[in-house]
């Protein structure tokens, strides 16, 4: 389990314990989970969950009515949700059958013997005689209370309660349904606001330890949403630079592997801040130089680095070119299918991307820099070479990358790196 997932699980357990204690004082009610999946329980007994696909219509009906229990739902909408575009000869009769069977199931589960689903003037309502506790409703209540609260400490507490009630996407396994997709988007925006505003309050009070925990939780609950920046900011503020650097490397690797994304502007900003703030103990120059050098065991092939490091090397090379004499080329290598089109998705793309990286590193010179730019893409900075040698390197990459009758290949783009005029030149001052 990753550190983020472990942190999120720990906070989930703490929150669940608090909710259980609170629930014991409020009397028995129908417990409804909408975030991260769907479940209904009564008196500790599970009535429905996502796992039972055979009861999908019962689930669809309960999801719709329990979530909209105050305002009710039109019978037409109930029919659309239950049967979608299926060709039902008598859809009204079919809907009545689903409702009838749902009532039988709820009664058998031990709920009070009442008319659970009432119909008035074409609107279906959940009977208020059966109390309901829904995580989505409580989440929104905490969020609204936090927005209205003026005391910073109470405001933060309410935001955190809201954050920890959000345990995943709203009805995550059914986002293709229109009403669910709409609600999922709305709740996602609320969760983002909760995290951002809670982090802002922690930043003001310099409570960076709790800010770190918030970032870990948010990243575990909503992966690939850039919440690692909250954790990284807290780590940098606390002077935990090595932890921040490891988090950065892990995050960049994860985003590349899962979505082929480069680091966000915010992550880059924090990485640059990390570089300016890192302080080391006083050392002799020989010791410093030894730490700066690569491990002798891994010094082979091209220099494989992250995008921010590659960007720094590129900019340094541009400056060095002001003194003239060097010919530098930037090459983009891209995995393509049998028709020459760039591959953007697919189960084999990640494996091909890894193989391409290995092929490039084995094909370029010791002094050339390489970084992964996106899914199926690599950048190579070729220093002190010629356009003709770029072609030689491309043939080497193909030799190492293409196996047997492999139908995929590599497409190359090459640009000359030129020194922009007046870059880095001193501006004359006034005496």
Image (cartoon, rainbow, N blue to C red):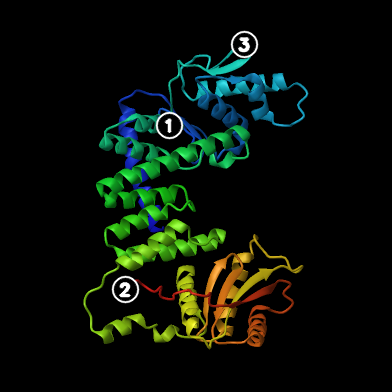
Q: Residue 79: x, y in percent?
A: 67, 24
Q: Is residue 232 left or right of residue 261?
A: left
Q: Earlier in the sequence, mark 3 or mark 1?
A: 3
Residue appearing at x 29%, y 31% in the figure: 150
Q: Earlier in the sequence, mark 2 or mark 3?
A: 3
Q: Is residue 152 visible?
A: yes
Residue at the disc numbered 1: 140
* Most foreground residue, 125 or 156: 156
Q: Is residue 404 above or below residue 203?
A: below
What numbered label is drawn on residue 121? 3
Residue at the disc numbered 2: 431
Q: Is residue 65 above or below residue 164?
A: above
Q: Is residue 304 visible?
A: no
- Screen quadrant of the N terminus: bottom left
Q: Earlier in the sequence, mark 1 or mark 2?
A: 1
Residue appearing at x 35%, y 48% in the figure: 214
Instruction: Find residue 181 and report its image quarter.
Output: top right
Q: Residue 68: x, y in percent?
A: 53, 24
Q: Which mark is nearer the camera, 1 or 2?
A: 2
Q: Is residue 8 above or below residue 246?
A: above
Q: Is residue 284 above or below residue 22?
A: below
């Amino acid at each position: 389990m990753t550190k983020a997932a472990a942190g999120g699980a720990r906070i989930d357990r703490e929150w669940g314990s608090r909710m259980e204690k609170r629930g014991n004082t409020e009397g028995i009610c129908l417990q409804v989970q909408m975030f991260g999946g769907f479940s209904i329980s009564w008196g500790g007994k599970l009535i429905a969950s996502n796992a039972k696909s055979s009861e999908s219509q019962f689930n669809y009906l309960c999801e719709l009515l329990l979530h909209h229990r105050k305002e009710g739902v039109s019978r037409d909408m109930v029919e659309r949700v239950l049967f979608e575009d299926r060709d039902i000869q008598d859809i009204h009769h079919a809907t009545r059958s689903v409702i009838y069977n749902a009532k039988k199931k709820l009664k058998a589960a031990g709920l009070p013997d009442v008319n659970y689903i009432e119909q008035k003037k074409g609107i279906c309502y959940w009977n208020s005689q059966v109390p309901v506790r829904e995580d989505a409703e409580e989440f929104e209540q905490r969020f609204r209370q936090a927005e209205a609260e003026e005391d910073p400490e109470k405001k933060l507490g309410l935001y955190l309660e809201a954050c920890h009630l959000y345990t995943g996407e709203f009805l995550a396994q059914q986002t293709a349904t229109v009403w669910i997709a709409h609600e999922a988007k709305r709740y996602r925006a609320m969760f983002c606001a909760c995290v951002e505003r809670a982090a802002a309050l922690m930043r003001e009070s310099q409570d960076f330890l709790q800010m770190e925990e918030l970032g870990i939780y948010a990243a575990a609950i909503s992966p690939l949403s850039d919440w690692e920046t909250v954790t990284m900011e807290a780590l940098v503020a606390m002077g935990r630079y090595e932890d921040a650097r490891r988090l950065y490397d892990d995050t960049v690797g994860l985003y590349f592997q899962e979505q082929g994304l480069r680091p966000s502007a915010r992550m880059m900003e924090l990485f640059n801040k990390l570089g300016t703030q890192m302080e080391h103990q006083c050392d002799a120059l020989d010791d410093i130089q030894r730490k700066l050098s690569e491990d002798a065991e891994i010094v082979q092939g091209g220099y494989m680095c992250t995008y921010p490091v590659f960007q720094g090397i590129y900019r340094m090379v541009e400056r060095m070119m002001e003194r003239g004499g060097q010919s530098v080329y930037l090459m983009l290598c891209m995995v393509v299918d049998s028709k020459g089109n760039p591959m953007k998705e697919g189960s084999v793309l990640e494996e091909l991307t890894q193989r391409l990286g290995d092929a490039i590193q084995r094909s370029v010179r010791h002094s050339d820099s390489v970084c992964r730019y996106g899914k199926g893409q690599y950048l190579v900075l070729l220093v002190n070479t010629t356009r003709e040698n770029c072609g030689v390197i491309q043939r080497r990459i193909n030799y190492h990358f293409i196996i047997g009758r492999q139908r995929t290949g590599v497409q190359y783009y090459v640009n000359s790196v030129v020194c922009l005029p007046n870059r880095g030149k001193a501006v004359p001052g006034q005496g």
